[in-house]
């Protein structure tokens, strides 16, 4: 069972949840401090904490039900105020500024993320001026042992409360939960800006799914230990890097990796969905 986690402190999260709950026959239960909504093959839970600070929430919620994956329904904030849907994994390459622990990574759910992206791609034209992007790994919670990812609406309160955006994201989450496709090639991504444009193109257009992604602003703290951990947690068979934005020091780390195939982004784009 997959569990969608929604925060009462997050207007985008509540927006997404309100639409999800119209898409099935849910049984509502109050268990401990949490309100659960159960469907046949997944559940939704309301929590009162901010999601980026929800370390070990999988352990706390496991007291009430058995589930194998978390989908965090969340807002996305940015100073440029762009209208955007995003998905990413949480964790910190360096210090922990916004939740989680320093140099610690959550366990990704790349297959569900991939299926979500393809489901969202079909619906983007329903929401005026919205775009989609992957994001690099950032913020907490990092202490999550079950596979997880964030699914977000950005970037201001106007977008967070946009009903059509909430409906589109909820529909895409539901399709991802129920999508049987699991034969994607899983990769860890390296390079690019925070919105990892090369990796975004690749997930939209090829057979690759991504677990962790590390933008170039993390390179000062990126080391072999973090890379190996990201590959292990993502269950990645590939490492895909943006050649132009990946510096020489990081490229030398690739030589010490084993068990993954190293591809430049332009090589990965040959694995087209067409």
Image (spheres, rainbow, N blue to C red):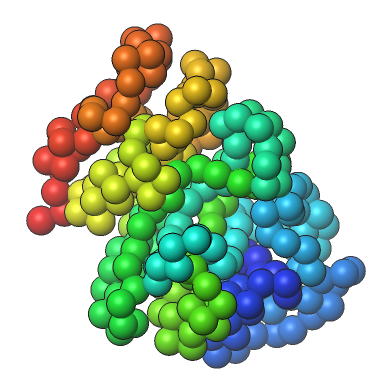
One can see residue 162 in this view: yes
In this rendering, is residue 126 above or below 255?
Answer: below
Q: Position of residue 65 (x, y in %)?
A: 75, 62
Location of residue 136 (image quadrant):
top left
Q: Is residue 157 left or right of residue 240?
A: right
Q: Residue furthest right?
A: 32
Quadrant of image for the N terminus: bottom right
Q: How many marks?
A: 0
Q: Is residue 244 above or below residue 193?
A: above
Q: Is residue 269 left or right of residue 262?
A: left
Q: In this rendering, would 40 be left or right of 131?
A: right
Q: Quadrant of the C terminus?
A: bottom left
What residue lies at 26% left-to-right and 80% top-to-bottom? Answer: 125
User: Residue 165 appears at what percent x and percent y?
Assistant: 44, 80
Residue at 59 percent of width and 61 percent of height:
72
The one nearer the camera, 120 or 60, is 120
Residue 210 visible from this viewpoint: no
Q: Nearer the viewer, residue 40 or 145?
A: 145
100 or 246, which lies in front? 246
Q: Nearer the viewer, residue 75 or 168?
A: 75
Task: Give the residue at x 63% y 77%.
Answer: 11
Q: Is 223 placed left or right of 59 in the picture?
A: left
Q: How far from the left and from the top, in percent, is residue 160?
A: 54, 77
Quadrant of res 259: top left
Residue 204 lies in quadrant: bottom left
The structure residue drawn at horizontal position 29% and vertical position 30%, both measured from the top left corner, is 245
């Amino acid at each position: 069972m997959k569990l969608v986690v929604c925060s009462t402190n997050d207007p985008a999260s509540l927006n997404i949840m309100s639409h999800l709950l119209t898409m099935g026959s849910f049984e509502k239960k109050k268990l401990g401090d949490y309100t659960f909504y159960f469907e046949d093959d997944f559940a939704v839970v309301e929590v009162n904490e901010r999601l980026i600070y929800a370390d070990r929430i999988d352990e706390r919620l496991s007291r009430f039900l058995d589930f194998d994956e978390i989908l965090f329904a969340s807002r996305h904030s940015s100073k440029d105020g762009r209208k955007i849907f995003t998905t990413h994994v949480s964790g910190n390459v360096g210090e922990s500024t916004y939740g989680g622990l320093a140099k610690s990574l959550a366990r990704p759910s790349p297959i569900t993320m991939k299926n979500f992206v393809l489901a969202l791609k079909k619906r983007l034209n329903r929401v005026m001026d919205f775009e989609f992007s992957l994001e690099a790994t950032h913020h907490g919670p990092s202490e999550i042992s079950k596979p997880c990812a964030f699914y977000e609406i950005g970037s201001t309160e106007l977008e967070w409360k946009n009903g059509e955006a909430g409906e589109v994201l909820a529909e895409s989450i539901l399709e991802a939960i129920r999508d049987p496709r699991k034969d994607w090639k899983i990769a860890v991504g390296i390079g690019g800006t925070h919105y990892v444009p090369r990796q975004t193109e690749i997930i939209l257009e090829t057979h690759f799914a991504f677990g962790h992604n590390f933008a170039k602003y993390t390179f000062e703290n990126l080391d072999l230990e973090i890379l190996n951990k990201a590959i292990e947690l993502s269950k990645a068979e590939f490492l895909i890097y943006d050649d132009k934005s990946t510096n020489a020091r990081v490229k030398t780390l690739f030589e010490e990796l084993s068990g993954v195939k190293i591809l430049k982004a332009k090589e990965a784009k040959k694995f087209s969905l067409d």
